[in-house]
Image (tube, grey):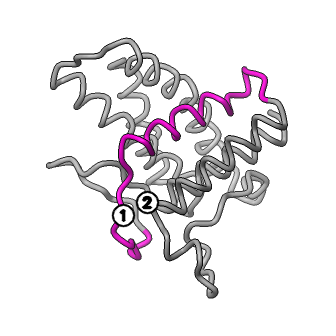
Amino acid sequence: MTEIQEELIGALIGLARSVDGKGEAVEGEPQEFSSGDSNGYRPDGVTHQILLAGLCAADPEKELTEENGKEWIARVEAEKNRLNPDCAVCKGKCGRTDNYDLEELETDDPADRALKEELLAGLFPMAEKLQKRQGSRTEEDEKQKSDNRTAVNFIYKALFAIGNYVGEKRLKSVVQEMKALQERY
């Protein structure tokens, strides 16, 4: 993985942090990861497209030029600022919406780091599949839309878990959820 790919992933984690790891509100789905300090803005279709396309661009299996990477980071930052306008101008930064430095993984407990790396590796193909599904269907049935929304919401939750201390038990739970979603797709 190149440095610019790591920076883009860190920005995407910052985006997930900025929405407290929550995707769209879906009745009956718990939104268990949260800093408890949400400013109420939820991601929308534009945010989802940036998230999915950004993850596809950051995929270590693909080439990402420095220039393209910087353009993607700027898009992610602009979206984060759109969703959190107060954070964009705050003089007393709390760090809640900060981008994540992937080098911080090195300081994690080895078991946590392994789970986070497994999560991250699984998100690239998931984002690719979701992006293709969204692009190939113009009239999705309700179940397909619901499945896509569930998977996109999961990506927010997984990125949030990678960038925040949630504990080994929660990380294992998120990895299990990812495996279940991968089987459905």
Residue holding disc 2: 19
Sequence order check, earlier mark of 2 and 1? 2
In the drawing, does residue 145 fall left or right of residue 168?
left
Q: Nearer the viewer, residue 28 or 26?
A: 26
Q: Nearer the viewer, residue 120 or 66?
A: 66
Q: Is residue 143 above or below residue 171?
A: above
Q: Residue at x 40, y 65 (%)?
A: 34
Tell me which segment is drawn in magenta: 35-64
Q: Are marks 2 and 1 in contact (CB under 8 Å)?
A: yes
Q: Is residue 94 above or below residue 32?
A: below
The local crowd at label 2, few if under 14, some if 14 to 19, many if 20 or more residues have their Cα within 10 Å, is many
Q: Position of residue 174 (x, y in %)?
A: 43, 44
Mark 2 vs mark 1: in front:
1
Q: Is residue 140 above or below residue 94?
A: above
Q: Nearer the viewer, residue 154 or 58?
A: 58
Q: Position of residue 116 (x, y in %)?
A: 60, 45
Q: Residue at x 39, y 60 (%)?
A: 33
Q: Amino acid at mark 2?
A: Val
Q: Residue at x 50, y 54 (%)?
A: 16
Label 2 sits on a secondary structure element that is loop
Q: Position of residue 139 (x, y in %)?
A: 22, 17
Marker disc for residue 41: 1
In the drawing, does residue 130 fall left or right of residue 140?
right
Q: Position of residue 169 (x, y in %)?
A: 45, 54
